[in-house]
Amino acid sequence: MADIAVEARDLKRSFNKGKFVAVNGLSLDINYGQIHALLGPNGAGKTTTVKMLTTLLQPDSGSVKIAGVDAVKNPTSARRKLGLVLGGDLGFYPRASAQQNLCFFADIQGVPSAKRHQRVAQVLQDVQLTQYADTKVSGFSRGMKQRLHIARALLHEPRILFLDEPTTGLDPDISLEIRDLVSRLARQGVAVLLTSHSMAEVEELADQISLIGAGKLVISGQVQDIAACAGFDRCSTFTLTPAQDGLLKLSELLPGAVVHERRPLSAQWLHTIYWPQAQSSAALEAELKRLFGRLPADYLCRPASLEQAYLAMADRLAR
């Protein structure tokens, strides 16, 4: 239990006098030193869940503990234990420097005056903005502002950090810097809850992934667990020309348990085949070699990606 940073049990929250149930009996644990991603389609209940976990919204019922503090009964005390990063271009005084902004927010967050400048210097160093301490925020790029948001959230030394879409709209090189920073914080023992629409980002960063659908937790685990829940563990992908495509009779070749998708891609057809653990891809590969003399040049058979597993779960996640 000492490793659990956030403990949510049977959370429920409705709106419109109970007519719309946004979250319905959701339970979740987030551990220190862990990056935990929360995924789900629009309307699944992610935002409502994060608001309840960060004390911005009271649940109708259920419990939330933040670093052992009852966040329902003592939201102010719980709030001091966490940092929330919503990001975006707003939230700072543009004519003030990064250092001046952080000193202001450190005061608001209750950082002791004797320690304030030390903490500001430390968080600027943590997010690699030390050389821009005296630069006005109006001159910051979007990536720099995002790092400054993270610095602000770290001022009061929380060991729990909530990140909402931390790299949305950022250039690839800046996104990489943000991901490196988040990984470094987790290695230092910070518990991170991450929401993102980038499956590749979540697959790279997250130690644990929770899928929410219709206000309920559908599954929590790693990529292979989500793929197994979707009914497969590997995918074969390859493209064929229209002439080649007409020769391949997959409906006669594949067992009934195997899911096959076929869609146009430029002047070719892209095939994706989802293999349950008990099924072998050997017969497919042998047939491709028989028909064309070799496997297609782009043929791949590999463990399922998070994106493939998530898309296969789409119907189960919908309201």
Image (cartoon, rainbow, N blue to C red):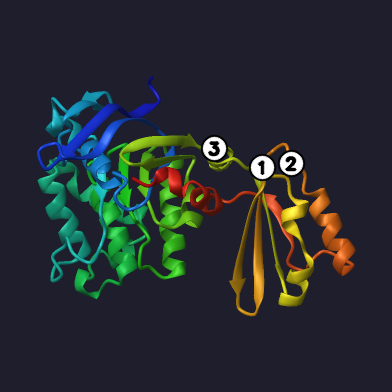
Give the image quarter of residue 71.
Answer: top left
Q: Amino acid at mark 1?
A: Ala
25 lies left or right of 33: left
Tell me how far mark 3 sits from mark 2, CA to CA. Answer: 16 Å
> Along the line of sight, which residue is nearer the eye, 17 or 237?
17
Dot 3 alpha-carbon crowd within 10 angstroms: few under 14, some 14 to 19, many 20 or more: some
At which x and y percent is residue 159?
32, 36
Q: Which mark is residue 229?
A: 3
253 lies left or right of 157: right
Dot 1 and dot 2 residues touching (CB under 8 Å): yes
Name which residue lies at 77% across and 44% down.
Answer: 280
> Along the line of sight, which residue is nearer the eye, 86 or 312?
312
Mark 1 secondary-structure assignment: loop
Q: Is residue 14 visible?
A: yes
Q: Is residue 241 above or below residue 49?
A: below
Q: Amino acid at mark 3?
A: Cys
At which x and y percent is residue 69?
22, 25
Q: Is residue 136 visible?
A: no
Q: Which residue is mark 2?
A: 279
Dot 1 and dot 3 residues touching (CB under 8 Å): no
Give the image quarter of residue 292.
Answer: bottom right
Q: Which residue is mark 1?
A: 257
Q: Nearer the viewer, mark 1 or mark 2?
A: 1
Q: Is residue 294 above or below residue 277?
A: below
